[in-house]
Image (cartoon, rainbow, N blue to C red):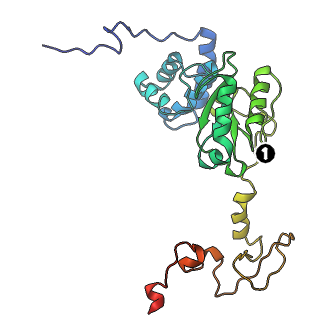
Amino acid sequence: MTTSYPERGVGLGMPELPAPAYPDDVRARLDADAREIVARYPGSRSALLPLLHLVQAEEGHVTRTGMRFCAETLGLTTAEVTAVATFYTMYRRKPSGDYQVGVCTNTLCAVMGGDAIFESLQEHLGVGNGGTTEDGKVTLEHIECNAACDFAPVVMVNWEFFDNQTPDSARRMVDDLRAGREVAPTRGARLCTFKETARILAGFPDERPGAVGESGGAGPASLTGLRLARGEGGPARVVHPRDGGPHTEGADGTGTAVHDPSPTEHLSSHDEPQETSASDPAHPAGPTAEEGE
């Protein structure tokens, strides 16, 4: 007896229908773009990720038609394309908004107010995580760290930064997006729609003013270590709150009590070995075994 395995859904009341084809004019345009993308790579299979962005730019999400197009273009099976499209969260699998509003809820942004912003926007927009407003303008989601911790809490719209947000500023921003008013990111290029963003991610030129070299980069706190490593900050001067010795004016001219550590001192008073009673009077302890020897 031979056992056959039907296609997904066949025999279960859910027949697998062939993916509809793109209209001829759309197919011709996508074919030309796809040839340009594939030519960048020594092996055509490597072009799958940008091709998925290309078809996402066409319809706003990766459809079965788009995956079929990628498979035919690269000589892959639709299963191979689907495996990639479903693995990466940057590819949408259902219709979504013109503006993808992502609220960072990783640790620093969360404690600085990211969780409050996300909860406020869910209530304000009437959608949950991954939900899209009825007008099709905004899709809301919580996102992972976007390496902008200096500016926490951060909200991103189509991958452009909106720094130092509050629940009020975030609500005003999504209201402006839905009303069609101009919204300017904190830094970088002007805002564009999700479809336009997807085409840029496919590797086509980003011709927006400010798109190249003006995205802002790291903030002051992250750059402090780099400046010190380059010797741009002068000798380290540290605050010793437990120290009653001589102090001088702070390097920033604010009068902060600081002093220059001697070679025998620890660079930070918080690293100095202390008896337990010195740091926690409620739990005193005697000298360590080494000190008693």
Name the one closer to the observer, 109 or 24: 109
Residue 57 position in % (x across, y down) = 63, 23
Whether residue 203 can be seen here: no
Residue 69 position in % (x across, y down) = 52, 19
Residue 104 position in % (x across, y down) = 63, 41
Q: Secondary structure at mark 1?
A: loop
Q: Which residue is mark 1?
A: 214
Residue 28 position in % (x across, y down) = 61, 15
Residue at 64% x, 88% y: name it.
Answer: 264
Image position of 269 with respect to 147: above or below: below
**Residue type beneath disc 1:** Glu
**Residue 193 falls in which quadrant of the image?**
top right
Whether residue 231 can be seen here: yes
Name the one closer to the observer, 242 or 246: 242
Residue lying farthest left?
Answer: 1
Image position of 133 with respect to 190: above or below: above
Name the one closer to the observer, 186 or 82: 186
